[in-house]
Image (spheres, coloured by chain):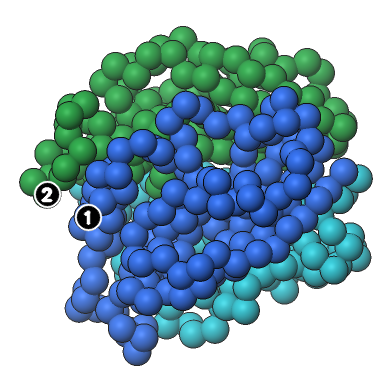
Chain colours: A cyan, B green, C blue
Amino acid sequence: MIQQYEFSLPAFPRGYHLITSKVLAQLSDLPQTGLLSLFIKHTSAALTINENADPSVRTDFESIVNYIVPENLPFLKHTLEGPDDMPAHIKASFIGTTVTIPITNGQLNLGTWQGVYLCEFRNHGGRRQLVATVYS
Amino acid sequence: MIQQYEFSLPAFPRGYHLITSKVLAQLSDLPQTGLLSLFIKHTSAALTINENADPSVRTDFESIVNYIVPENLPFLKHTLEGPDDMPAHIKASFIGTTVTIPITNGQLNLGTWQGVYLCEFRNHGGRRQLVATVYS
Amino acid sequence: MIQQYEFSLPAFPRGYHLITSKVLAQLSDLPQTGLLSLFIKHTSAALTINENADPSVRTDFESIVNYIVPENLPFLKHTLEGPDDMPAHIKASFIGTTVTIPITNGQLNLGTWQGVYLCEFRNHGGRRQLVATVYS
């Protein structure tokens, strides 16, 4: 059986944000056993699963990923929308548009330290639209 | 219900290529609600979702990803197949082998600016084999 | 139909390890047509699909990914757990927590050169917990 939910999340500042509870608030009761596929309908933001406890992990994410994918590389052509735009597209493909999470005993079967991140790569990204598909 | 399709795409030059319509042409009518899982059976090419409008985004993808994962790093051992080979494996794991896309109202529920990319990392990659699984 | 299996794998040394047969050993007979979703319940290890033949690919993976995501970057704050910790979180999100593999004719439909890797990013990661969900 498939259930699907489409919803938007409020604008987040550039950076990495825990959204596990915001996503769960959008879903009806989860099935006993199944999978959640969560998809973001954008190309300059991403979804991932990472450490859910220490906020400095999210701060370091921002610093390290900016170090690996720097702005203002001299060879870029797609620069009209600002220096944060093209790096945002690369980050989106490295980190990914979908997370798939097992559902076990009616709950997301995440590890103790796992949470869902919305990764906002734009300086002013605005609201972001997500689609959650639950199948069982 | 599960439907599965296996097909190959013609050889693409090294770089990033929009294949959304080529993939859809391989599938029968999509279900009203479901998911498409698209898988590439190779380790030196990848699938991702990114910007579907400005070709300079795809050109910049090639430049930036080559900047992040350079060829000819002096410490490499797996070099027999040429300088593009080992970087291709790394890019394949960073960008990924699968995309999962929600199906809503009988269509892929992509964002306005989203398209499916085939990322060809080899200089002469040849035809690439894909498996599409649609479940509903 | 959904079948789900949760199991742990023994501790691996830091690096990249082929686990395809170890995963298959945990599953009952696969369905004729379906998908396997494999999930790792950790934020400093990852799953990916890559080259299954030459061990030097896995050695080069370790070297290149360490080159791209170096340890001891001077601006980091989350450093209490050692220099391998924060880079491990970044690598986990770049490479990913899930692999999704089509099942065709009762077998994983991997390409000739594809195998499943467990990527251990910590110096002493310990046992790792996985969840396999098979749907058909």
Q: Residue at the spot x=42%, y=66% of the render?
A: C12
Q: Are marks 2 and 1 on the same chain?
A: no
**Does C29 sit above or below residue B59?**
below
The residue positioned 46% from the left and 35% from the top of the image is C114
Compared with A100, B36 (above or below) is: above
Say what amino acid the circle numbered 1 marks: Ser
Q: Label 2's element?
A: loop
Badge number at residue A112: none
Residue sitting nearer the eye, C75 or A13: C75
Lateral position of residue B128 relative to residue A71, left or right: right
Q: Which mark is residue B75?
A: 2
Find the distance from the CA under tag 2 to the CA under tag 1: 7 Å
Q: Residue A33, relative to residue B109: is it above or below?
A: below
Horizontal side of residue B86 vs B92, given as left or right: left
Q: Which mark is residue C63?
A: 1
**Around disc 1, counting alpha carbons within 10 Å, would you say few (fewer than 14), some (14 to 19), or many (20 or more)?**
some
Query: Which percent across, then down, holds residue B36?
Result: 70, 33
Please name the residue shown 86% across and 67% down the image.
Answer: A106
The residue closer to the viewer here, C61 or B106, is C61
Report in which chain the residue with disc 1 lies.
C
Dot 2 and dot 1 residues touching (CB under 8 Å)? yes
Looking at the rendered structure, the kind of residue marked 2 is: Phe
**Where does the image place residue C117, in percent across and percent down from the top left?**
46, 50
